[in-house]
Image: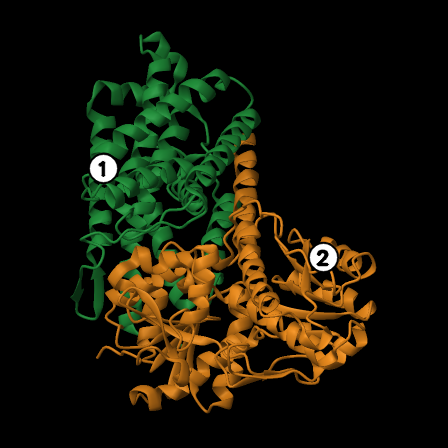
Amino acid sequence: MKRKVLFSILAVMMALSMLISACAAPPATEAPAPTEAPPAATEAPPAEVEPVKVGAMYPLTGDLAKLGEENKNGLQLAIDEINAAGGIKSMGGAKIELVWADSQGKPEVGISEVTRLVQQENVVAIIGAYQSGVTVPSTQEAERLATSFIVSMAVSDKITERGFKYTFRICPKASWYAKDQVTFLKDLKELAGMDIKKVALLHEDTDFGESTAAGQKQYLQEAGMEMVLEVKYPASAADLTTEVSKVKAANPDAVLTVTYLNDSILIARAREALGMTNIPFVDAAGGTVDPEFIKQLGQTAEGWFTEIEYTKYAAGAEPLNNRYVAVFGDDITGNGAYAYQAGYVIADALERAASVDRDAVRDALAKTDMPSGPNMVLPTDHIFFDENGQNPNAPLFIVQVQGGELIPVWPGAYAAKPVQLSK
Amino acid sequence: MILSFELLAQAVLTGILIGGVFALISVGLSLIWGVMRIINFAHGEFLMIGMYISYFLTAKAGWDPYLTVFVTTPLLFLVGAAIFQVSIRPILSHPSMNQIMLTLGLSLILQNLALVIFKADVLVTSTAYTRMTFTIGPVVVRVSQLIAFLGSGLAAILLYWFLQKTDIGRAIRAAAQNRDAAVLVGINVRRTYLVAFGIGSACLGVAASFMIPFYYTSPTVGLFFGLIAYVVVVLGGLGNFIGALVAGLIIGLTESVGASLLPGSLARVLTFGIFVLVLLFRPQGIFGGRQR
């Protein structure tokens, strides 16, 4: 009997630990891959003009080092280009000097690094910080120190919903992933003659899935589409055939999903097995953006839609990608592209401010309005910051798996190929 | 929502097919418990090892996934026997808490070793069978899951025959019933334990090969299946062979039909709710005490 009690206690402990580990599992796109980040290679400034110091903070060591490096490389590329082209002309050709800070992926380190950058390094502004968990407290510290913080990437909605004066975000908010999914469904009528009226939601049930689904429901309602069914599942499920069968039974015109990698694989297989390939499945940048999704599923992945922040296949993206590949070897990612853009945003603001005064830089940033061109590579006609410091023009790409590649099919002007729907 | 007949039929079929795999995984655990009263908390991790072996043979060496069963099964037998010999045998007479801690530690070691060697990536491979389906009325049957069910059933029958009809099988059952009496009649109990542990692990090799065509593998894949196996073994009665088989099907059905009725992780609550209720009200399992 005693053994049985012990056994029960242990089994329950195992159950709990499994649930906890399932909850704590990071999204597949943030898979840990620790690598040692090399120290920043900033060029020596010319003797005659003082360089302008700009702080840059990303997770450069720790679990997220690989992703931090994508940000770092993108920003470094932009600053190197700006300096090579003559620096800040209104300031006598002053070069921009990046002062790197490593958040180590930790909120408390982020705060102390912001303090160091401002008080010891005397930077005019800071760019960062990739993770929402680090960006939220770091921008708060920057606000306290009256120093502009340009958020190149970190998607938590609240970052630009706190009434801060010194926080400027270029990248989209988390809730826009749901908004763009729904807009895409609406646009399918124009793109493929498909009139979407009934939509089913299929998502994993941690905070990632639940919060995105809340946004999906809101935007579906605003778009006048009917949500016919919502199916939630634990991402660790052994089989999702039943869940996908439920979706099929509801007979939707399209399905919006929020997934991690393992469950997206099970769903893709069940979708194919149940003969649902004629129904568009649109994922919210979950497991489906992991290269493994296509690599391992092959034909089964074909036709899936998902969202990404940037793609080399977008119209006009090739020159930037080629420059990036020439220096760093890999294709540029969403992190890299948004960090690259942040470099040009600060250069643009410094050009107009013609000053290293932090408030002058802040006011210049607030008046940012950059039209599409060599200095503005995002898939939109122009970027600016609203009164909350949020760039309202940060559309995501909807990409479709076509021939084993993620091909952008939306927004229309930046699509590389038309949407393909199987009958 | 209203549960349609089609949906229910699909859920029942899926539940039975996946339940067959649960059953085979659990039989191994049940056997080990029945013979030497050790709960192997690393059971799920043995499955994970089997799945990696089968994955690499299938995806990298181009084997037919079902041929890999002839590699994973003997290999898992050896892995189980080796681990038993090195770590479990020395503490067989120790308090059960030590044994639990040891197998729990083994589980963590194996998981983290897999993490170091294979990274956290989720690996799947599309085999020739993966995309095959056929329909019976409104119900879609995935061939890979059907084969897994049949293969698991066949393996369980073979194991049952082995335990009933062979000398080693009889020795295993004798050692399970009464260790001292078994020693007295001249059975080499130490060797019997070794073989039993190996066979319990080999069941996972079979399950792993049959799962590869429709399931993914990752360093933590064993967590879920290990946990399901404990639930199944408790439900079927600790050490009860037939009980574990039937309970495997019941849990498969609970997971699947539960998922069609309840949202999200509530279906999981149902599974573990059964587990807790059985422990509270019928700790000997729904099929009575230990039978052999």
Q: How many C-alpha atoms fall within 10 Å of the one at disc 2: few (<14), some, or many (≥20)? A: many
Q: Are marks 1 and 2 in contact (CB under 8 Å)?
A: no
Amino acid bearing label 1: Val
Q: Nearer the viewer, residue A358 or B20?
A: A358
Which chain does tag 1 point to? B
Q: Nearer the viewer, residue B166 or B144?
A: B144
Q: Colour of chain A?
A: orange
Q: Quadrant of residue B68?
A: top left
Q: Is residue A116 above or below residue B38?
A: below
Q: How many C-alpha atoms fall within 10 Å of the one at disc 1: few (<14), some, or many (≥20)? A: many
Query: Which residue is depicted at the point 42% across and 49% down?
Result: B121
Q: Which chain is green?
A: B
Which residue lies under the disc numbered 1? B69
Q: Is residue A56 left or right of residue B208?
A: right
Disc 1 versus disc 2: distance between alpha carbons?
A: 51 Å
Q: Quadrant of residue B53?
A: top left
